[in-house]
Amino acid sequence: MSARPHLIALATIVALGLLYAFGSKNAVALDLVFTLFLYATLGQSWNWISGYAGNISFGHAIFFGCGAYAAALCTNAGLSPWLAVPGGALVAAGLALVTGFPTLALRGHYFSIATIAVGALVDTYVRTQGWLGSANGFELPIKNGFAWLQFSNKGPYVALALALFALVQLATIALERSRLGYYLRALRANHAAAASVGIDERRSKLLAFAACATFAALAGVLYAQYTLFVDPPSTLALSISIDIALIGVVGGIGTLWGPLAGASVYVLLAKAVALRLGGSGRGYDLVIYGAIICLIAAWRPHGIVGSIIDALRRRRGALEAA
Amino acid sequence: METLTTFAQLVAGGLLTGLVFALVALGLTLVYGVMDVVNFAHGEFLMLAMYAALGLGLLGIDLFAGLPLVAAALFLFGIVVYRVFVRRLLAGPPEATVFGTFGLLVLLQGTAQALFSSDYFSAPNRPLQGTVHLGPIALEQSALAEGFGALVLTGLVYAFVEYTESGRAMRAVAEDRIAATLMGINVQRINALAFGIGSACVGAAGALLMLSYPVYPTVGAQFALTAFVVVALGGFGSIEGALIAALLVGLLEVLGGFYLSPELKMVPVYLAYLAVVLLRPQGLLGRR
């Protein structure tokens, strides 16, 4: 399929998003839009390794954390957080290579549980390190301006989140049409058959893992500059990794637009729950997410976008047969 | 001498903890062995059992009388969950069981939080709060009861799987589902039974744990993570392996918590998991 409809859709989303970012004064709505595109970026990053490559990770937050902590360290040291963009990305890619090299060859739940273990080890490590803020985390000093990636209103943040989402989405469109993309899908479908035609599993998956860790780290930098607070529960914890995975699953794993669909559901639900039921501390949001995931896993295992694609294919098939 | 006594004390404590891990892991490995499903919500089943035991306690039913009731309730719950939900997951793509049981984890945790808040609750009038002295070693009566209770129950489940007709059918399904079907075994019934027994294991474990632990919505997570490690270490699907691995993990956790620091107690456990799946993926006693 040609990339054109996807590029047009992406351009439309970016244009509308930018109009809204600079046209709206509604801080609550802008916060939602920011969160939407940040999570969509994280979901797409997860989708590379778990959707296209088929290694379901429950530890993706550690890469997000790399970026967030890099930004916090830079800003606190009086350096521009722009330095954290290559810095955090490098650390995340390095971490992906070091942890991926032994674990990416594991299959099914062996890999998933290994990612939980690695995530917990990273989380525990950070909690014991004074220079990383221990368990308390960091507050970031308030600065202002593009050089500090801090702005007095939310518009520029939304624009940056949109830009990041567009970047990751373009990379994914390219991935779907690249040799690497075909390798990953072949490995996911049947690793033995893929290996028998000469696809190097470890090399392909490591490349994808390092690339998607970089995207997650960029999201982490933006997140830290937006909230000006970074600690293990908000960036590294298992619950963050689970949220990222849920967005990917609800939208439809291994699909281009799944993460955006999943993030939309996630953000809308979070908002609706907070408004209707008063705060998320009571667990109602978890009840609804959990129920949705159960329903999708049991009745629509290909997610929202995956089910739409299936339906379109069936229709096309029926038309061609007629 | 002092250090030796401390060490002996820790080993005893670690082994008793390990016996409880064994019972929890037994449920997980049984389900995995029979239907190749890793139930990510296993810890949440344990959490439900602990709330159930707490509820019975508040009604004046003590923990030992409550144990069979909770185990029976979880058995039924497991069968319903299998019939309504897990059976559908098995018909889907392979990742559906991972997501589906993970969704169940989120749903059950959220439900507990919505119903009971995030507060910690302990059972009222807990029996066995004293200590027993074995020479220089002092052991909590509750830990002894938990360890030996878990050992007896593990033995019962093992005997069921080894020596009964249904247990034999379960092992047949675990070995070769298609051949078992051809021999006239109703695989759906056996799967449901295995899921029920796996849930009953955490049902009993949950009632036992209320002797010394408080219950809160995320209490299952630490036990479930440990159980994953135990099951991988022992070899997915192996009952004997799970028992040995559980004792090892119990020791690692208690010794790690003492000699490193309490917040690092899980570190050796996770490292052990990674070492095992990377170096000996079939586990200590696993097949394949």
Image (cartoon, coloured by chain):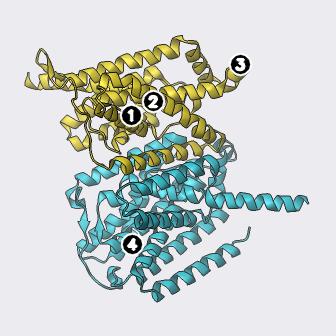
Chain colours: A cyan, B yellow
The amino acid pointed to by label 3 is Gly
Residue located farthest toward the top when viewing the structure as drawn: B163
- Ranked by sequence position, the earlier of labels 1 and 2 is 1
Residue that label 1 marks:
B49
Give whichever of discs 2 and 3 has the lower sequence position: 2
Element type at marker 1?
A: helix
Q: SS class of the residue under badge 2? A: helix
In which chain is the residue bearing label 2?
B
Quarter residue A274 falls in: bottom left
Q: Cβ–Cβ below 8 Å for labels 4 and 1? A: no
In the picture of the structure, the residue carrying the numbered disc 4 is A222
Q: Specify the farthest residue to the left.
A: B2
Tell me the number on the disc at residue A167: none
Identify the amino acid type marked 1.
Ala
Q: Label 3, on which residue?
A: B184
**Residues at marks 4 and 1, CA–CA distance in whole angstroms:** 42 Å
Judge if badges 4 and 1 mark residues of a common chain.
Answer: no
